[in-house]
Image (tube, rainbow, N blue to C red):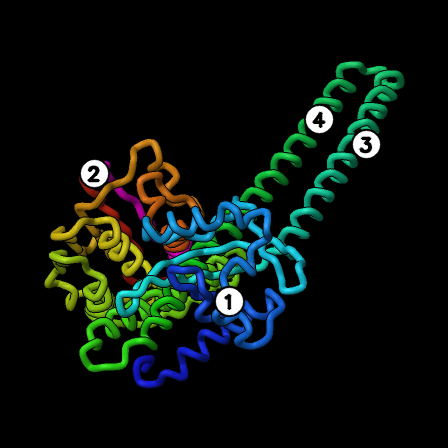
Amino acid sequence: MFHQNKNIFDILFKAMPEGVIVVNNTQIIVAANPSAEKMFGYNTNELNNLHLSVLIPKRYAVNHNRYFNTFIKNNNVRKVDHSSNLYGITKNNKEFPLEIGLNPFTVNNEIYVIALIIDITTRKEAEKKIENLNRDLDKKISERTAQLNNTIKQLKELNINYKKEISQRLEAEHKIKIALKKEMELNELKTKFLSLVSHEFKTPLSGILTSAILLGKYHSNQHQEKRQKHIETIIGKVNYLNNILNDFLSIERLDSNNVNYKFNTFNLSKIVNEVVYNANMLLKNGQKINTPNNTDEFVLYQDEKFLELALSNVIYNAIKYSPQDATIDLEIYKKQQNIVFKVTDQGIGIPEKEQKFIFKRYFRAENVLNEQGTGIGLNIVKSHLENLGGNIYFTSEENKGSVFTFELPINHK
């Protein structure tokens, strides 16, 4: 669809809420979307053919040329860095904080750099407010602690039973520590979640935007292969974002006990064939999936959609963390009143010291931190399985592979 209608790329470019600027290797701006123009206070097309330095505060301009030339020379993608303190300057000389992701690309032997720019003024203000709130909270805690200490002192003076008073004091201190610890853990979890969502969404969106822009530059038939490659990139990243959203929705429903399971009778071969068909499109070079021949033997009364989700998650993980030319084995068999699914891979495995955390929400082992992922898929699968009377477990050895096994009743009661 994208290569048949150039207008859609202009729509995507103009509709991006983040600022997008494209410069050539001499730092001349060749394109800027409306969000970027509005962000820096310029009129439509006013930024075109201007030097990039007009958007950079003078105190940073001295070193910027050196940084830009080094970036062009290295030709590396620079992801959004949340720890950097970067600033831009508007047409009326007003500075504002921002985050920038850079991606070099070449068209007709000319080097360009596309920049994804986010105005984080609101976030910085929010962070300042949070700092003030934390300071106020510390003050209130100190005041409450002082009040508590005063109460304890009065209890010591009035309470005849000294041991009972000591016990009350210790209990009060313990409750305060527990409450503070829970609050810290909650804040840490929220921060981790927001950081995870920001990273997992921005990286695919940047890739989609880059591929969409490049698609608009390929017009002749001889570029069909390149167009197809970018189309596949867009489709893959959109599906990835869709899966993340589905995972987050599943978590919300699980946490709120708002899961509605739909049970029906179906042949297992239908689910297996569909999951394996979709998985085959994700296989790396030389990878293959061995499937059993006995799936027609099993007729289940279960939640069909959930079973597909669980089997897909385990098989997709096996593909993702296995090298090229690896084999993934799927076994299915009956165990008393349960149906058992066993997936064996030849992947990177899970470090022994981290195996006890593998079903924890948002947890990711140290050897997969460079891979895309949210760390919530297995947590969702385990929660659903337990709700349906099933279970999931695994064995794994680092650099040798993993075996994930899950089972659930053939007939839900």
Mark 4 Cα shell of 10 Å, populated few (<14), some (14-19), many (≥20): some
* Residue 284 sits above or below residue 59 on the image: below
- The alpha-carbon separation of the residues under discs 4 and 3 comes to 14 Å
- Compare residues 270 and 376 and report the one nearer the observer: 376
Q: Residue 173 — which label?
A: 4
Looking at marks 2 and 3 on the same chain, the residue that comes earlier in the sequence is marked by 3
Instruction: Left or right? Give the position of 407 relative to 330.
Output: right
Mark yes or no: residue 301 visible. Answer: no
- The alpha-carbon separation of the residues under discs 2 and 1 comes to 52 Å
Q: How far across and down, in percent of the image, does residue 276 sit?
A: 20, 65
Q: Are marks 2 and 3 in contact (CB under 8 Å)?
A: no
| Residue type, numbered disc 1 | Leu
| Residue type, numbered disc 2 | Asn
- Compare residues 287 and 294 and report the one nearer the observer: 287
Looking at marks 1 and 4 on the same chain, the residue that comes earlier in the sequence is marked by 1
Looking at marks 4 and 3 on the same chain, the residue that comes earlier in the sequence is marked by 3
Q: Residue 143 — which label?
A: 3
Residue at 32% of width from left, 58% of height from top?
Answer: 310
Q: Are marks 3 and 1 in contact (CB under 8 Å)?
A: no
Mark 3 Cα shell of 10 Å, populated few (<14), some (14-19), many (≥20): few
**What residue did someone put label 1 on?**
50
| Residue type, numbered disc 3 | Glu
Mark yes or no: residue 21 visible. Answer: yes
Residue at 19% of width from left, 64% of height from top?
Answer: 280
Q: Is residue 230 magenta?
A: no
Residue at 73% of width from left, 35% of height from top?
Answer: 138
* Residue 23 sits above or below residue 392 on the image: below
The stretch of residues the image draws in magenta is 382-399
Q: Residue 399 — which label?
A: 2
Looking at marks 2 and 1 on the same chain, the residue that comes earlier in the sequence is marked by 1
